[in-house]
Every structure is written in structure tokens, then in C-alpha cells.
Amino acid sequence: MADATPEASKTRRVLYKATKLAVFLTIVGLGIQTGTAFFEKSGPTRTQAEKATPESEVGDWTFAGEGLSVAVRSIDASDAEKELRGTGDAGSVDPSIPKGESESGILELLASRPPTVKAADGRRGWRQTISGIEVYAETCKSGGGDRLAVARAAWSSSGSGLTLLEIRPEAVTGGNERLAKRSFPAPKGLTELAQRVTTKGIVTGYLLTTRESLVDAGQAMTTSLTSGGWSVEPVELGEEVSAKTMACRRGEERWQVVVFRDGTAADQTMIMCIRE
């Protein structure tokens, strides 16, 4: 009995890490998807020509401080397996892209479980269900070691659809540092989950999270912005119970801030800030 205890303890640690990682991915995915939906209701409509100009480039989402790109979209439940596994488009990883903490954590988790697919070139694939979340990941050999090629997670969304999150290692021009100066002050105690960064390294969006209530987080954000010289105007969307939207201006700078809460995301209050 005593000999089985270390193994049981190790199994519990692995399951804990797996669940924690799966929940973290869900929080990031839900935050980006839900926050973007709120923002699109109140944000300005750009034409395709305007989107093509460097000044209006919005950039892509990445994990804060990590070289991991983040993409979130809705899919039909019937397409879950096909979308999770992709079409062999995982590709290779440029060894010059640093291996960040998040990628190392995913690789550590994958190493604790036997792969479901093995290839002669060193590529490995995993298909798992973790804490009710469908997960697929591929690793490849790059720079003399294992690297994450792609990881996807799918979970139940509204109606019969699913939310699909996809992450890949990606070099971010201009850097994506955790301590990069924001365009506006933010209250203390917030955790930065993701940034939206352009090809020129300009940060055009943030996804933050806090344990504070929706009302308290909104008030703290308003106080922080006004103390930094920003004008803050509430935007009425008829969804004040689940979200608070603010139009923020300082000189020529214009940002939209959406404070919202999603019970499926571990009861976190999210704050998404998007440059107009």
C-alpha cells in the first residue's frame, strides 16, 4: 500500500495540472470570444479599405508575455473532431521563437500522457478529454528538442455549437512583454491573460481578469482611467447585468473597455480593452 502512494500522488498532480491548464485555456478563449462580441456591438464599423491600412491594423491575439498566437471561433458540434485534428496543417516551428512558460507547461502535461499518434519524423499527437474539454495537440522536433506545433481545445458554447481555441508558437514583432507599458493605467490586482499585437509590435488590445465583482471591477477601472487623464463615457447596450461598456478618450487616443462576467469561466470578471 505504501509503495502505491507516490504513484497515486503523482497521478493526482498530473490530473490537477491538466485540469488547471484546460480551465485556463477555456478562460482565455471565452474571454476573447465574449469580449469581442460585446465590443462589436458598440465599436465603430470599419470598411475593408480601412482595415487594409497600417494605421488601422488591429493585430492578432497572443498569450501575454508568450510567443503563442491565440485564435478563437465558433464551430458546429458535428465538426468537432475534424476541426480539432485539423488537416495536417500544424507545420514546423521556427527554433528562433523562444519557448515560453505556457508552451513549456503544455509540453510537460503532454509528456505525462502517452501520445495517440507517433510519426517517424518525431511528430507526436495527443487526443484527450480533460475536465469535459476536448483537446488535441501536436508536437514536433525543432532546434534539437520538442516544440508545440499546435494545440486546440473545444467546449460547449451557446446553443448546439462549440467554441474552438487554437494556439501556435509565433514570433511577435516588437515583442510581447508582460511588463510592456499600457496605453492607460489599470487597477492593481489584475492578471493579464492576452494581448492583441500588430505586426509592428503595437499593442491594440488587452484581456485582463480579476476576482472582483462586475460592479467593483467596473468602478475600479473607471477610477483608474480618470486618474490617468482619460474621459470615460458609459455605452448603453441593454446588457448592464452581464457587462459594462465604456468609451474612453484622451487626446487622439480612443479605446473601448468592456467589463463582463462569465460564470462558465471560473466566475472570473474579464476586462477587454480594444483600441478603436
Image (tube, rainbow, N blue to C red):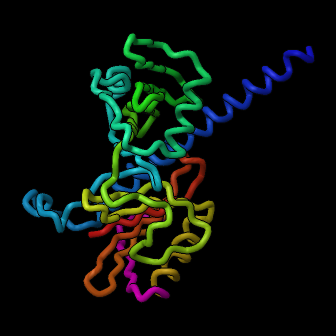
Coordinates of residue 30 in the picture (x, y in percent): 45, 47
The answer to whether residue 160 is magenta is: no
Residue 221, horizontal then vertical, whole percent: 51, 75
- Residue 4 screen position, x and y as percent: 85, 16
The structure residue drawn at horizontal position 21% and vertical position 61%, both measured from the top left corner, is 57
Q: Residue at x 91, y 14 (%)?
A: 1
Does the magenta run of residues contain 229? yes
Using the rendered view, name the quadrant where residue 212 is placed. bottom right
Query: Is 225 placed left or right of 71 in the picture?
Result: right
- Quarter of the image with the C terminus in it: bottom left
Q: Nearer the viewer, residue 73 or 97?
A: 97
- 113 or 256, nearer to the observer: 113
Instruction: Pick whichever, 227 or 203, lies toward us.
Output: 203
Question: Left or right of 168: which side holds 12?
Answer: right
- Picture quarter containing residue 206? bottom left
Q: Nearer the viewer, residue 40 or 225?
A: 225
Residue located 41% across and 48% down the image: 67
Q: Which residues are magenta?
A: 227-240
As drawn, the residue found furthest toward the left would be 49
The answer to whether residue 50 is above or below residue 160 is below
Residue at the front extreme, as displayed: 144
Instruction: Note whether 44 is above or below 132 in the view shown.
Output: below
